[in-house]
Amino acid sequence: MKCVRCLHDTAAKFAEAPDKSGAWEMYACSRCNFTWRNTEEPEVITPELRDKNFQFTQEVSDLQILVPVPPLKK
Amino acid sequence: MNIYIENIKGHPGKSVALNVHGSWANIAVMMGMDKNTPVKEQFFNFLGAWDKYPGEIKFIDKDKAPCHEVVIKDNINIVEMLPMFRINKWDAGCFFSKASVVTKDPYEPDNFDTQNVGTYRMQVMGKDLVGIQALGFHDIARHITHAEETNKPLPIAVCLGVDPVLTFMASTPINYDQSEYKFAAAINGIPMELTKALTSDLDIPANAEYVLEGEILPRVRVPEGPFGEFPGSYSGMRLQSQFRVKCITHRKAPIFENLFMGRPWTEIDYLMGLNTCVPLYKQLKETMPEVVAVNAMYQHGLTAIISTGNRFGGYAKSVAFRLASTPHGISYCKNIILVGPDVDPFNLEQVMWSLSARVRPAKDVIVIPNTPGMPLDPTSEPAGMGAKFIVDATQPAAPDLILRDTRLIDNPDSKGFEKIIADLQKAATKK
Ligand SMILES: [Zn+2]
């Protein structure tokens, strides 16, 4: 399924309302880690309606690492 | 005022609490004071409690701890077990914004005092996967680095809905080898009740509403953010650490406590107000007894106002340099304003008066470029770099040239009347 933020085909359902009422479902993208519920406002969960500033159009490898992985100790 | 939400769609029996720390009145009540106590008085009260460190710890049996009333080890699914929600519209997902996160230094597994309890934002990324923002200067980053050097997972416990004083201490920058638990006990004046986690040797608050236990995955960095943050803007998206949850425990009918962060002022500004001021004051006071009070309540100390005497000409500027070299001040304290000992740094009218009447722009305003910066500060560019400004609004002392001979107007002696008026006002609001 398509991720609403990075638009890759890397999203899938991972949760639903625990009372099994079908009140909501929730999806996660394994590439950019965006998550959303099907019941959220259209502006947040529809790619065409989302604010362009909050779409993810880069490559994951381009992101800054704040705490670098240290060298392994022998 | 607190906000309590029940009858959440899809989550029968669960509830959410917000804004538990969200006013000066709430903070005063947490400290056992009258809810109308002025902020400067709350500052000095917190100082007094601080000096009672360390408080006592009391261990409760694992089986008797309320946080272990319900234990879930199979089929973990965080958002099905907790009523989580997107806090700000453009957040990357559901975040824990008010957790007390416990880790130990893997090089010192038996050292209680270097065990860290901190508040870090954490993004739920899947059934049992959570991203965690550990910045270089955070104590937890040191633990993660030590675990990663040896390629070992780092046990972590995420405690939600704890004693408000513990939440307060978890977001207080104290020294690496000081215990947040012992501080919370000192402030409360009663022992802090802890118990052991079920899947690790970590010590956790026995009365927590929820505890998520897991392990930080070594040498892993995953996309995290953005997230609406305390400067009132969204953070960037970065590669951060990640942990896997192995066990969730909670009380019967647990309350999920989280924090809303918006454009200041919101709850986080009250939560991180005084606890940013006091450690900075303590660290300055150790070597600079002329310091009277520190108000670093603005965006976790990005702006700080220090009231200090001038031991000799230019001394106040040295106080600013000292602030800029404290563990917290190095990256956070960007705008540093110095006022004299006769000015209440929590009273912004007085602060502005000192800027108006005591600053000689050519001598008293300094900018230091290219210093460490706070990555979440939108002016930090590249993220992590910054600059400082110092404005010295104190009365100059010799051998500095003294300001033109001025005579200050004395304030009327109103001390005796202040209490009478405050009591009258209190009585009036009760009706
Ligand atoms: Zn995506």
Image (cartoon, coloured by chain):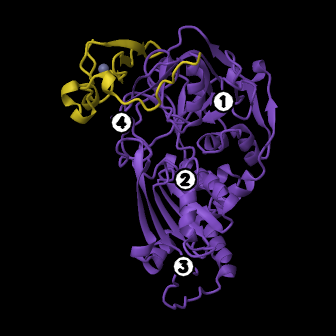
Chain colours: A yellow, B purple
Mark 3 surroundings within 10 Å by alpha-carbon count, few (fewer than 14), some (14 through 19), many (20 or more):
many
At a point 49% along the width and 70% down the height, the residue shown is B392
* Same subunit: marks 2 and 4: yes
Relative image position of residue B291 (x, y in whole percent):
64, 66
* Foreground label between 1 and 4: 4
Most foreground residue, B311 or B279: B311
Distance between the alpha carbons at the discs numbered 3 and 1: 52 Å
Give amino acid for label 3. Pro
Residue at which label 3 appears: B396
> Which residue corresponds to mark 2?
B23
- Mark 1 belongs to which subunit? B
Q: Amino acid at mark 2?
A: Ser
Query: Relative to B383, is B427 on the left or the right?
Result: right
Marks 3/1 in contact by CB < 8 Å: the verdict is no
Amino acid type, label 1: Ala
User: Which element carries disc 3, helix, strand or loop?
Assistant: loop
Q: Which residue is mark 4?
A: B236
Q: Quadrant of ligand 1?
A: top left
Specify the subunit that label 4 lies on.
Answer: B
Quarter residue B106 falls in: top right
